[in-house]
Image: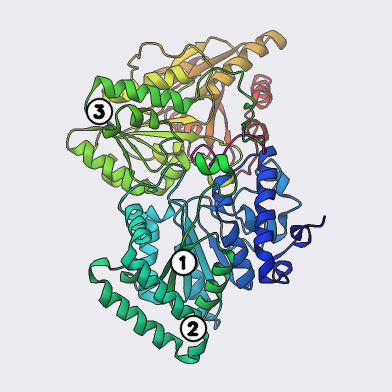
Amino acid sequence: MTKLLDNIQFPADLRKLGIEQLPQLCKELREFIIDESSRNPGHFGASLGTVELTVALHYALNTPDDRIVWDVGHQAYAHKIITGRKEQFHSNRTFGGISGFPNPAESEYDAFIAGHSSTSISAALGMAVAAEKQGDPGKQIVAVIGDGAMTGGMAFEALNHAGFANANMLVILNDNNMAIDASVGALNQYLLDITTSRFYNNLKKSMWRFLGKVSDFGPNVRKVAQKIGNAFKFMLLKESNLFEAFNFRYFGPVDGHNVFQLVRTIQDLQNIPGPKLLHIKTQKGKGFKPAEEEQTEWHAPRKFDKHTGEMVSAPDAKNTAPKYQDVFGETLLELAALDARVVGVTPAMASGCSMNILMNAMPDRVFDVGIAEQHAVTFSAGMAKDGLLPFCNIYSSFMQRAYDQVIHDVALQQLPVVFCLDRAGLVGADGATHHGMFDIAFMRAIPHLIVASPMHEIELRNLLYTAYKAERPFVIRYPRGCGQFVDWKLPMEELEIGKGCCIRTGKDVAVLGFGPLTYRAYTVAEELANTHNIDVAVYNMRFAKPLDTALLDEVFSQFKHIITIEDGVKTGGFGSAIEEYAQQQHAAVSITVCGLPDEFITHGSQDELYALCGLDEKGIAESVLQCALK
């Protein structure tokens, strides 16, 4: 039997359907996402929740001329499927396949890159202003913000500006009460209050009756809307609407799974100029019972049986070594048990970074601040200023958003905040927006910071303890994935700050490693000794700042050919630091810097991407052989 989706390649095809056919199309789209994601995992729950919204937007708008700016782009799978990528969707997030996030380089229907959160309203406002300046004020610009992204401060900065600019744009707040974990904070409670307020919803129904007749008012629609809106403001005094205070006309909340109502509403709102906000209620994981019931677990699941919901074991399930994030979480719990001053801070990534381990055991010692990295850093600084020892865990690529706060609020005051940068290096399928490539370079430039990275998970444990004992601004970066050792839970040891060590002696070439690639270099050195009779010395430097200059002087005196290796961008990174010191000392050495190139790296598996960048075992071996033959 032919499905409606079979004949939908682009939104123009969608708009040929009768509105009564849209529920069936939504059903087929949801089944398509479930079927494909069961075999090729990705961000699952969020996209199931936006199927009706996606169909309604493309049905009511004239895309791609009208713009849809997605926030937290993992909501956009249905969007990708009906904008020319249905046949390629099986390659989602795989090496050489389509991206898991909207990307204008991939499709004209992708208005803006959306990997990080809380950016959509700013970008949409810019597009709305551009349309007005270019003589096209009727162009429809829609920002879809959800999955906790409204908790980000940038979203409120944009609301403030958009209301003042009186820009013609629509913000759709996709309210599913979730980020990866359950949404937190006063805003989440406020949205819940709006949803459950009987008084407010009675007034809302009056507004929808008005909207149902909006076409009858013709050119006077704006005046009528203003009059009714002002009457609402007067009536609501104590139940005033936050978004109305930003000069946005607020509509909702409405059922985000009622495609008929969504289409009619979006069509009607096109006739009301100025900034508007439509508040819709959706369910993350809608249409797949396991994802509805366990929304955090099904945010980005492994492969699964689409009939039973049973997840398939991960490819590395036989590797019983723990994930780095779990080593962090377990060790933080131990430190918190040792010292009442230890607290944890996370910007909406409690389960993602395993801070939920401490949260479950000592809920009063963990602060989930929502998707608000800048606030997380300065909040940590405030606690540190008055006697606490905060461990602020932020993914490496997300820390880019709080750079000024690290400089101004922590380092300048030399406050004892420990920054734990999870997902350092190449993260894999999330691609360019999420790779933790730049933190070595940008953290190394800041005075008073200690910048460290462990060779393996045992050393991560020791670095966390060292940072706790140091009571200084401290950065520890570590990768996504599993470590090396099953028996990792050894007594914690305090390491000497700024000191590395030799882990393999040799006479031909020296490898200076920073981070987990050091262990990979060690295994390569062992192999080369057996296969090529090349004797490679390997040094675990541990610290990019401060450098172990005494150890470097020793290396410079013994070796003419040196390789540095790191899982960060080469420009300004660890290798650059070694080159700078060698130049200062006028050392007569040849240095080969191995790291990530000066470009944005695509998506794929971690193994594929490290091979692409020459940082797998084969690539490291080739670099060593080239140096040895000089």
Q: Disc 2 or 3, which lies upstream in sequence?
A: 2
Can residue 266 be seen in this snapshot? yes
Residue drawn at the location 38% of the way across and 60% of the way down: 195
Q: What residue type is disc 3 on?
A: Glu
Q: Are marks 2 and 3 in contact (CB under 8 Å)?
A: no
Residue 604 vertical placement versus 482 (above, below): below
Residue 261 vertical placement versus 84 (above, below): below
Can residue 105 be seen in this snapshot? no
- Give the percent coordinates (x, y) of residue 325: 45, 28
In the image, is 35 to the left or to the right of 287?
right
Question: Closer to the camera: disc 3 or disc 1?
Answer: 1
Q: Which residue is mark 2?
A: 214
Marks 3 and 1, how far apart in space?
44 Å
Q: What residue type is disc 2 on?
A: Val
Question: Closer to the camera: disc 2 or disc 3?
Answer: 2
Q: Alpha-carbon neighbours of circle 2 within 10 Å: few (<14), some, or many (≥20)?
A: some
Q: Nearer the viewer, residue 200 or 315?
A: 200
Q: Which residue is mark 3?
A: 471
- Give the percent coordinates (x, y) of residue 68: 56, 65
Q: What residue type is disc 1 on?
A: Val
Label count reads 3
Magenta part of the protein: which range? 296-307
Q: Is residue 191 magenta?
A: no
Q: Which residue is mark 1?
A: 171
Hey, which quadrant is residue 491 in on the image?
top left
